[in-house]
Image: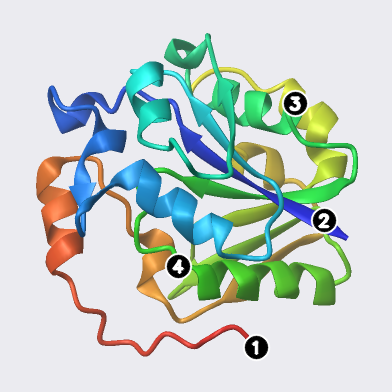
Amino acid sequence: MTIAAIILAAGRGTRFGREPKMLAAFEGKPLVTRVAEAALESEAEPVIVVVGHEAQAVSAALAGLRVTIVENAHYREGLSTSLKAGFAALPEEAEAAAILLGDMPQIGTALLDWLLKAWRSSGFPSALVPTFQGRRGHPAILSKDLAPAIARLTGDTGAGKLLRPLADVVEIERGDPAVSRDADTPQELAALAAQASTIPVRTAE
């Protein structure tokens, strides 16, 4: 059973300043490159990257990587448009997709593989969402069965609103703060780079 990875990297990142957020360096690599490499080393297949703002430059940062780049011409209309573009690009054989945010560079391969395995072992629910200390985070695993509902999303909203009324959404506590750490500003990115988690991160089982 194939589970794809969709990396949302199209937003303008207006709080980040002049530099395109997806190209900001984290441990010597652009954010988007860091996230894409982690996904490529996982069991997810294929890895789809949705670009929009500074699409040419962001795509160039992915040169040489085995990713499928999807350009979202409507990225200014909000996050929903990128989620829709990514889901529309899923291959027929994909049963689900892991939704990764391009500004969460601490999401590693082991964590992603652990979530893919958890989705399968949970009976292929509509969604599986990691939590940290009871709060939902990313990446979520979304069943391809949600494609029609995702296609109806509008505005600057992700899948969270869509998942609230569903009965078969599985929340799973990972004990890893990375699932809730993103970087909306250069200061937040610097804090992520300086952070050393005090919580041991378990390897995929």
Query: Residue 17 appears in which quarter of the rendering?
Result: top left
- N-term mark: 1 or 3: 3
Q: Residues within 10 Å of mark 1 (few under 14, many from 20)?
A: few
Q: Which residue is mark 2?
A: 2
Picture quarter with the C terminus? bottom right
Task: Give residue 87's position: percent from left, percent from top.
Answer: 72, 32
- What secondary structure is marked by label 2? strand
**Residue drawn at x 61%, y 31% as measured from the top left:** 83
In the depicted view, which residue is nearer to us: 66 or 185? 66
Per the image, the residue denoted by label 4 is 108
| Mark pair 4, 2: CA separation | 19 Å
Residue 205's disc is 1
Give the spatial CA distance, label 1 vs label 3.
Answer: 31 Å
Marked residue nearer the N-terminal end (3 or 2): 2
99 shown above or below 59: below
Q: Nearer the viewer, mark 3 or mark 2?
A: 2
Horizontal and vertical percent position of residue 22: 31, 36
Q: Earlier in the sequence, mark 4 or mark 1?
A: 4
Q: Quadrant of residue 66?
A: top right
Give the residue type that dot 4 points to.
Answer: Gly
The answer to whether residue 137 is seen in the rendering is no
Circles 4 and 2 in contact, beta carbons < 8 Å: no
Give the labeled residue for mark 3: 88
| Amino acid at dot 2 | Thr
| Along the line of sight, the residue nearer the viewer: 38 or 162 | 38
Mark toward the start of the polypeptide (1 vs 2):
2
Q: Which amino acid type is marked by label 1? A: Glu
Q: Are marks 1 and 2 in contact (CB under 8 Å)?
A: no
- Marks 3 and 2 in Cβ contact (< 8 Å): no
Near-viewer residue (98 or 78): 98
